[in-house]
Amino acid sequence: MKKYILSLAVLSLFYTKSEACAWSDPDYDYFNLFTQSIIKDKSYLPFLHNYSSRFYTDFNQKLIPDENIESWKKFFNNQLSYAETDYLVNKIPMNDLNDLKKGNSNNQLLKKLGTSFYKKYSEGIDYLIEAKYLEPYMSINYVETPNSFYYSENKIDKNATNLDYSKTITALTSLYNAAKNPEIKQRYGFQLVRFNHYTRNYDQALQAFKTYVAPIKLKGAPYFMALDQLAGAQRGLEMKSDANWNFFQVFMNSNSRKESAFVSMKLSDTASFNNILKKAGNNEEKNMAYFLLGYEDFTNPIPLMEKMYDIDPNSEILKVMAARSINELERSYLPTYYYTSNDNTASAATQTASDKSTDPPKSNTVEVKEKELSFWQKIVRFFKNLFGGSKSKTADGGKTDQSDDELLDNPNRIPFYTKNQSYYYDDKQKDFLSDLEKFTAKTKEKSKDEYWQIADAYLKFLSKDYKASTKILEDIKTTNPEYLEEIKRMKVLNDIVSQPKITAEYEDHLIKDYSEYFIEKEVKKDSTKTEDYYGPAPSTASFLKDVLANRYFLQGEDGKSFLMSNKLSDLQYNPNSSLVKSVEDFYRKPNKTQFEQQIISKNMDSVGNIDAFFSVIYGDRAMRMADFEKAKSYYQKAQDFIGIPRLNYDWNDNTQKVTLHQYGAAEYNGFRNISNLVFGHNVWESFESPSDVSMKAEDYSSFPFIKSNMNKLELADALIQLKKIAGGKDEKAAKANQLIGNLLYNTSILGYYRELFVMDVDNTNGGKYDFWNTDKKNPYQYYYKNFLDRSYIEPDNFDLAINYYKKALDFTANKDQKARILFQMASAEQGKYYQYEAKNPAEISYSDPKWSEKNDAHQKQMDETKNQKYRTYFAMLKNQYKDTETVKDLMGSCSYFSYFMK
């Protein structure tokens, strides 16, 4: 490996547009529906738009042929293919060519060419022998400076200074003079320039170019290879302007060296492209200078595109600029995820149940500033038309669309994009989409390339004018296979996105005509590409699935919407009973369409017995509502439940194996192995500690039906029996009420066993255990794609536990026992306060100059509300039970309670 010396300035050339976070790839944050790479001149592929790296890389490098190989192919009178020429020039060992020269080569390609090949092309073969001898030494001898940092592992010792300078120059000069073919002569000239450059004999490199390269009136690949070396030497002599101009010429006139020439221009002259524009002597050079300026400063390329249009509306680089502009628009209009900012965000004002601090957390409300509304308005209206708006439920259970004005009147309802917002929208700039549409419409009238018609049709699509877009596409006449594929895909987009309702008949149309976008095929690995860390990139197919998921959502077919984006097993993470019911309705739907069977039903993945899976979820919900009889009826249908479907990920020789977790006989699986400690109380609050450390059992001697280890059916049956006993008015009834209250509290968001009735395997922290800021029955506005980013579990009803505790308190005579019950009631009441707090965040902009003052006022109001409405049972403990042993013990184990009591 070469020794690399890179300054921070150099590194910035390559990473100026990358994300700050290594775990984020902005090129995966949007749907790339318009194929940038359909441009005809593939040498400009690296200059298409992306954020992940300095140059665009999502293409096969073989699409950009090396002009040097093409030159050699022509030299050999096209007797060899491009691949064979590349092998001969770059890969065949020097000894094989020497054997060919002697007439006894064993190389298969050279044997095929025969001994006459050397006789016919002896000058070329002799040159290649010399070039292969020199090549291992052709690197510059880097000189370290105190301001450099470098990577030197496995450094290569060879460089140009290892060769005898005088002998090498003499040999190359002699070979130059002996050569008869002008192209070969010029190639020796290139070697002379390069050797002087790499030995830091910069003046001699300049002289070699003048003496051995320029006089030969050829400007093919060898000339620009030599010019590239000349520019490097000029840069070494601080002739930055001259070096930059020559790198610019290399950029213009080569295919495979554009990237390196571009970087060299940036290194040579910080004002490089402006200086090139000043020096440009003809329209071709001016056009290229405008392109470089637009590429480097992409804030609003249309003014520069206008200048390029005036020079040549058929310019290929003008199409590159248009492709980049369309791609930037896509990043704003077609994100892979979009969210609301405040409807159901677990803001910092919402605490997790394991972090019940008395200090108020700060709000994390996202503010949409007034000056940004024009941008958001465009985005909202685009999604309103594209995705049909959002839905809410009316009182009679029907669904109603919100108007644009309603969305805009409440900025918190506006989809919030976390990154890659468009550069083009603010109150000082015109609507970039409109401007680009006008430019494209104008250019398509002048240019003979159908590209501009395709671009115009796509911009009409982004403008929601699907009929106009389709009309343009229908009128395009082309034989270009890339264009035809793009036209076909865009027609599909227009058809599906413009469909207001997805009916059974339309589903038949989808599966019949567009199955390739919905039926997943096995993806073969491309040997030319490295495996992507982020998985497959967002595609047209994934976009169309999102559109359908949104349509089903708006139509009230939540189950189908959910399954377009999720697996059945994903319900475990947000087991909302109404959504589960909708998924179940789809599961049981008779006479499914072919689309429903092949596309949607495939996501009904392995959960074991599906009926048992649904029954556990329904039973759990009934338990949380204290409807133990209903819970038992569901649990009776769930006895074949194999466990919450969790996956095991095992790695072996860099290969990941994914298997469904098999629960052990004594392991809690979502149904069995529940300890009777669920009826107990906290010794101290620690979710991480073992159950016998955090929890203490009550006296169950009067209730022999409470087993030490139960499944959910047995647990529901025990609760039914406790409920019957709790109807009495004696101490046993009091104890039964207390045990039921304990179970309801212990399985709430605050309890040690909070995982039992929310389809989880343990109580470790996560979204299920957050107090979410929402009053909505459904926090999703568009679809269920971001299902795991929201809490969609019905909130706890702490009054259920409190009501059972009240009965226990009424029929308990022992004062210490009363204190214990009151503490449990106070804990449940604290849960009610956390719910209130989550629904009433500060919502103060951090940019507000009076933020601190307003935040303090808000906190004061919250503290007053807490003391007035949510400290009822703490106050009773403090005033009436301070002298009990129970209170003394609690003060020793609960610092918050101890603080309050003082």
Image: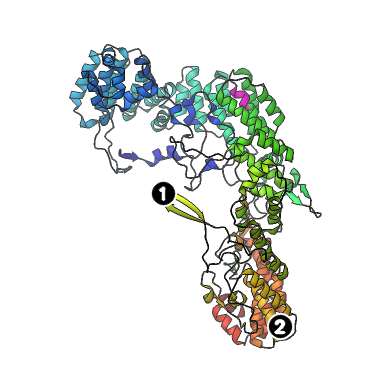
Q: Is residue 452 magenta?
A: yes
In the picture, measured across the screen, residue 358 lies left or right of residue 47, that is right
Residue at the extreme right: 396
Give the labeled residue for mark 2: 733
Q: Quadrant of the C terminus?
A: bottom right
**Bounds of the magenta span?**
449-455
What colour scheme has been applied to the protein in the rendered image?
rainbow
Give the labeled residue for mark 1: 654
Main secondary-structure element of the magenta-colored stretch: helix
Q: Look at the image and tell me whether residue 422 can be seen.
A: no
Q: Is residue 368 above or below residue 610?
A: above
Q: Please report the residue visible at 70 percent of the width from the left and 79 percent of the height from the top.
A: 737
In the picture, measured across the screen, residue 189 lies left or right of residue 846, that is left
Q: Look at the image and tell me whether residue 639 can be seen.
A: yes
Q: Quadrant of the N terminus?
A: top left
Q: Return the disc, 1 or 2, that comes first in the chain's sequence.
A: 1
Residue 345 in the image, given as x and y percentages of width and height: 63, 55
Residue nearer the viewer, 392 or 429:
392
Q: Secondary structure at mark 2?
A: helix
Dot 2 amino acid type: Ala
Residue 420 in the image, given as x and y percentages of width and height: 57, 42
The disc label shown at residue 591, or none: none
Q: Secondary structure at mark 1?
A: loop
